Amino acid sequence: MLNQNNNQKDNNSGVEKLLKSVSNKLGKSPEELKDASQSGNVENLLSNLNPSDAQKIKKLLSDKDAANKILSTPQAQSLIKQLLGDK
């Protein structure tokens, strides 16, 4: 049980670091990122990107097969494992 609590703390720390990094790059607060991820509304988050990049992300998010393809890459799987604490 103690080990599970430590893993949860590590996971939360990793997610917080990722949120801070992404928020800096997008010019949005971590709270705005959390709200957007929970609501599914990313329009506000994409407003600070150049239009070409924003359109690419919108297209990716609207295409389930493309999103799954990207998420199944070794790089994405490695990042997911790091975020979830599986090393």
Image (tube, rainbow, N blue to C red):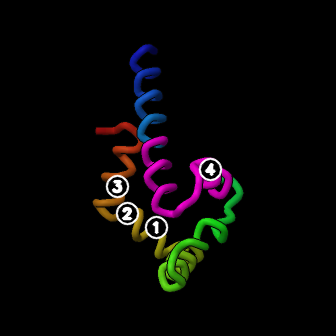
Query: Is 78 located above or below residue 57 in the figure?
Result: above
The secondary structure that most of the magenta stretch takes on is: helix
Task: Please give the range of residues in magenta.
Answer: 16-37
Q: Earlier in the sequence, mark 3 or mark 2?
A: 2
Look at 59% across and 52% down and name the residue there. Answer: 29
Residue under label 1: 68
Residue under label 3: 77
Q: Is residue 24 magenta?
A: yes
The percent coordinates of residue 40 (x first, y second) are 67, 61
Callout 3 touching callout 1 (CB < 8 Å): no
Q: Amino acid at mark 1?
A: Asn
Residue under label 2: 72
The crowding category of the residue bearing disc 3, from other C-alpha atoms within 10 Å (few below 14, some 14 to 19, many at least 20), is few
Look at 44% across and 35% down and name the residue there. Answer: 13
Callout 3 touching callout 2 (CB < 8 Å): yes
For residue 11, the mark is none
Callout 3 touching callout 4 (CB < 8 Å): no
For residue 34, the mark is 4
The percent coordinates of residue 78 (x first, y second) are 31, 52
Q: Mark 3 and mark 4: span between their CA atoms?
A: 21 Å
Q: Would residue 28 appear left or right of 77 to someone viewing this image?
A: right
Q: Earlier in the sequence, mark 3 or mark 4?
A: 4
Look at 59% across and 76% down and name the residue there. Answer: 62
The mark closer to the camera, 4 or 2, is: 4
Q: Mark 3 and mark 1: span between their CA atoms?
A: 11 Å
Look at 34% across and 55% down and name the residue there. Answer: 77
Q: Mark 1 and mark 2: span between their CA atoms?
A: 6 Å
